[in-house]
């Protein structure tokens, strides 16, 4: 039960951070058509209504630019609020199709279309991150001033293990839109890059005003200590995580990494089994146990 609560908290915090970014974003929208006020529905966040009407219009005129923009945006914003991955991806795919069609025409909205398109590609997962980067950089080169564009670029580069680019964009994002979660994300990227001094600097800066952030910070501190071969300190960090959340599969997994680094493979496998038993979908533990 406690594990589910932490997962739910993490999802809620992620969505709150995303929507806080949207409030700072002004998307330039074209004029509505004569029959229906897209702008009015948009202001009321009636995304389902826009989608319903928009699809009716597009059945008759598949390249209606005005409708493609509003409907494509609406699929994105509706999708981002859906927790079910399959339903979210279906919305993102429809958003991508419509916004790609928009780019076949000319118009001043293309900067914003690229911006939303890049984010939609990012939410479709790893295999679309190169396209996310392409369109987000395209929007940036055209003067996009969104506060979250650097964060999305950093996340996309990070998924592709392009740490230098990820760090560069996370640092820019931190300048324009500072937050504890972003500070921890930057620390995580420096750990991946093996720069443990920089990772330590950002870990010190990050606040932990809720249980989810505190747990994430402790996990990252433990990972940093593994990289520094300070194994006792790493175990201490993961023990603190388990005191906060006994259902943390990550804590047991990284505890296993500590024992693996020390050459104590039986102890390592015991920790990975605990992680797997807590969460059979824990990918890293499955790789350690069954590959």
Image (cartoon, rainbow, N blue to C red):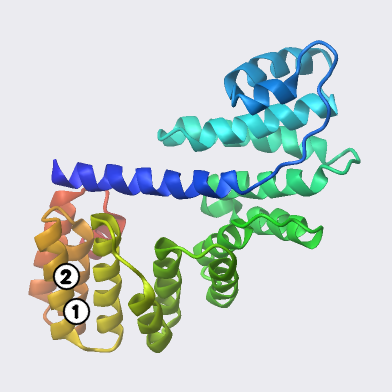
Q: CA distance from mark 2 to mark 1?
A: 6 Å
Is 268 in front, or is 131? 131
Q: Secondary structure at mark 1?
A: helix
Is 162 in front, or is 68? 68
Would residue 50 appear left or right of 77 to someone viewing this image?
A: right
Q: Which mark is residue 238?
A: 2
* Res 165 visible: yes
- Residue at the extreme right of the image, as rendered: 106
Is 45 in front, or is 234? 45
Crowd tier of the residue under label 1, counting other residues whose Cα lies within 10 Å: few below 14, some 14–19, many 20 or above: many
Q: Which mark is residue 195?
A: none
Q: Position of residue 106 (x, y in %)?
A: 91, 41
Q: Position of residue 227 (x, y in %)?
A: 30, 84
Would residue 83 appear left or right of 129 to someone viewing this image?
A: left
Residue occupying the point 59% across, 56% down: 148
Please name the residue that numbered disc 1 is placed on: 234
Residue occupying the point 44% across, 78% down: 190
Q: Secondary structure at mark 2?
A: helix
Q: Quadrant of the N terminus?
A: top left
Residue occupying the point 57% across, 57% down: 152
* Res 263 visible: no
Q: Are marks 2 and 1 in contact (CB under 8 Å)?
A: yes
Would residue 176 appear left or right of 56 to someone viewing this image?
A: left
| Whether residue 88 is situated above or below residue 185 in the rendered picture | above
Crowd tier of the residue under label 2, counting other residues whose Cα lies within 10 Å: few below 14, some 14–19, many 20 or above: many
């Amino acid at each position: 039960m406690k594990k589910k609560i932490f997962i739910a908290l993490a999802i809620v915090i992620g969505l709150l951070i995303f929507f806080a970014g949207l409030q700072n974003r002004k998307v330039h929208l074209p004029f509505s058509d004569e029959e229906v006020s897209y702008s009015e529905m948009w202001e009321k966040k009636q995304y389902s209504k826009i989608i319903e009407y928009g699809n009716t219009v597009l059945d008759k005129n598949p390249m209606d630019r005005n409708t493609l923009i509003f409907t494509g945006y609406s699929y994105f914003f509706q999708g981002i609020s859906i927790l079910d991955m399959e339903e979210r991806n279906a919305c993102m795919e429809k958003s991508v199709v419509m916004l790609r069609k928009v780019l076949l025409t000319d118009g001043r909205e293309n900067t914003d279309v690229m911006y939303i398109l890049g984010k939609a590609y990012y939410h479709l997962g790893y295999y679309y991150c190169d396209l996310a980067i392409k369109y987000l950089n395209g929007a940036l080169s055209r003067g996009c001033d969104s506060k979250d564009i650097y964060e999305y670029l950093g996340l996309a580069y990070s998924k592709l293990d392009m740490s230098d680019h990820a760090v560069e964009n996370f640092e820019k994002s931190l300048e324009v839109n500072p937050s504890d979660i972003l500070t921890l994300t930057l620390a995580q990227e420096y750990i991946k890059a093996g720069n443990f001094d920089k990772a330590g600097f950002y870990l010190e800066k990050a606040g932990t005003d809720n249980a989810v952030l505190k747990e994430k910070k402790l996990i990252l501190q433990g990972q940093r200590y593994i990289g520094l071969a300070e194994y006792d300190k790493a175990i201490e960090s993961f023990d603190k995580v388990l005191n906060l959340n006994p259902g943390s599969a990550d804590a047991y997994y990284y505890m296993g990494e500590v024992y693996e680094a020390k050459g104590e493979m039986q102890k390592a496998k015991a920790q990975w089994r605990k992680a797997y038993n807590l969460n059979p979908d824990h990918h890293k533990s499955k790789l350690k146990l069954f590959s």
